[in-house]
Amino acid sequence: MTQPITFADLALDASLRPGLDALDYAHLTPIQAQALPAVLEGRDLIAQAPTGSGKTAAFGLGLLQGIDASAMHTQALVLCPTRELADQVGKQLRKLATGIANLKLSVLCGGIPLGPQLASLTHAPHVVVGTPGRVLELVQKEALDLGNVRTLVLDEADRMLDMGFDEAIRALVKRTPKDRQTLLFSATFPDTIRTLAKAMLREPLEISVEGGAQPTAIRTHFFEADATRRAPQLAALLLQFNPESTVVFCNMRRDTEEVAGSLAHYGFTALALHGDMEQRDRDEVLVRFANRSCSVLVASDVAARGLDIDDIGAVVNYELPTDADTYLHRVGRTGRAGRNGLALSLVAPQERGRAALIEERQGSAIHYERIAPLDGRPRGVPQAAMVTLRIDGGRTDKLRPGDIVGALTGDSGGLAKDAIGKIDVFATRSYVAIARTQGNHALAQLRAGKIKGRKFRVNML
């Protein structure tokens, strides 16, 4: 029996070992085992890999291996479709680069003021992670020079094209050396991706880790949908299966608000996530879903990219997507990390053609079930376990998670530590999850007291 390949088996620089140890990485995931040896050899790569497959380490170790930290110019560029994914990739790369002294990594995305980013580029970063529009804007302002880029990564390339970044990507590629290494990762392989790869990659190795079907740990159910009563049917599904956390996918971004509002009317803790939202609002929705103070996230496909949560209890297709690849990518967000998953789909008669594509892809017939729509507001709708408090202070105020915990638990009447959940500290704001039964007590505690000797405005979201 072949032994699984480990990171110790690869010709990695010693400076990468501390990062691997800090992340407790030992054995490679399937995408890493297929991609990393080729990436380390300097080959171009086109890889089909979903979010959560370990692809960031697959390209991250390769690009970090080639960085010369003594050379003060930009040597690697990673392009992502959304700020959320760029932030996630940036955090992962920083962890992997723990052992590389003096490495500078910058995350450059739209949705935030340009001035601080321009100021940060006075000294060129070794690695840039960002969205195509903002990176191109900085290049055109001559604040960022890509003339020494050795490695270019296009992460979730299909969604970048869906979002209209094709021209920006091509303009950025023209600013990089022709002999660079290019690594393209995509959840799906439509013709547009093939065209992009042909134009930008040199004799790429092509790999896939999806295998054409969802993992066996995911239970799938398909229900006959009444197009006029789809929202009450969705609410009935959530009550029947009662998942702890759910992502509901809508095909149109305008539907996300309407569906979230309908679920809220029935008593669910539901929030919408779509591309038209202000960045701060998007950040807060993602924080609340990740910290369990929102139990249902109603999202468009593009907005859900960068959602880095391993234990999503269920995925619901409010409508079937138009292609099987998107369906597989959606349902692949549940049942991760060895957990069981649940995928529920509402299918109206006019969507049966889309269902046939899924049947063909998975190699088995779909069996339809019926679900009666809710009639009136039900009793006993489960509430999210936590609530979120927002503190108007963050990293710029030198706040750390420990400071917030201390303020909540310090007095004799303070909270028990097990009532405090996930804490997220951003530049100017911080968010702390509190057990729902203790939310008002925690709010009063923070408003009456001080954090790190200072008073901050605190609100419950």
Image: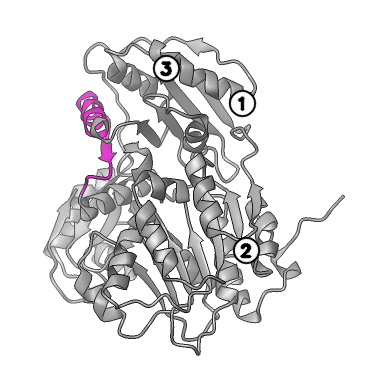
Mark 3 belongs to which amino acid?
Glu
Residue 400: name its quadrant: bottom left
Residue that mark 3 sits on: 351
Q: Position of residue 162 (x, y in %)?
A: 38, 43
Q: Position of residue 85 (x, y in %)?
A: 40, 55
Residue 443: name its quadrant: bottom left
Measuring 67% from the left and 74% from the top, which residue is drawn there? 12
Say which mark, if any, is on residue 25: 2
Mark 2 belongs to which amino acid?
Tyr
Say which label, 3 or 1, has the lower sequence index.
Answer: 3
Q: Closer to the camera, 379 or 347?
A: 347
Mark 1 or 2, closer to the camera: 1
Q: How is the image coloured?
A: one colour
Q: CA distance from mark 2 to mark 3?
A: 43 Å
Q: Position of residue 178 (x, y in %)?
A: 53, 70
| Residue 176 visible in image | yes
Say which label, 1 or 2, has the lower sequence index.
Answer: 2
Q: Is residue 345 above or below residue 153?
A: above
Q: Position of residue 90 (x, y in %)?
A: 43, 66
Q: Is residue 31 above or below residue 327?
A: below
| Residue 51 visible in image | no
Residue that mark 1 sits on: 362
Mark 2 or 3, closer to the camera: 3
Boundaries of the magenta span: 256-277
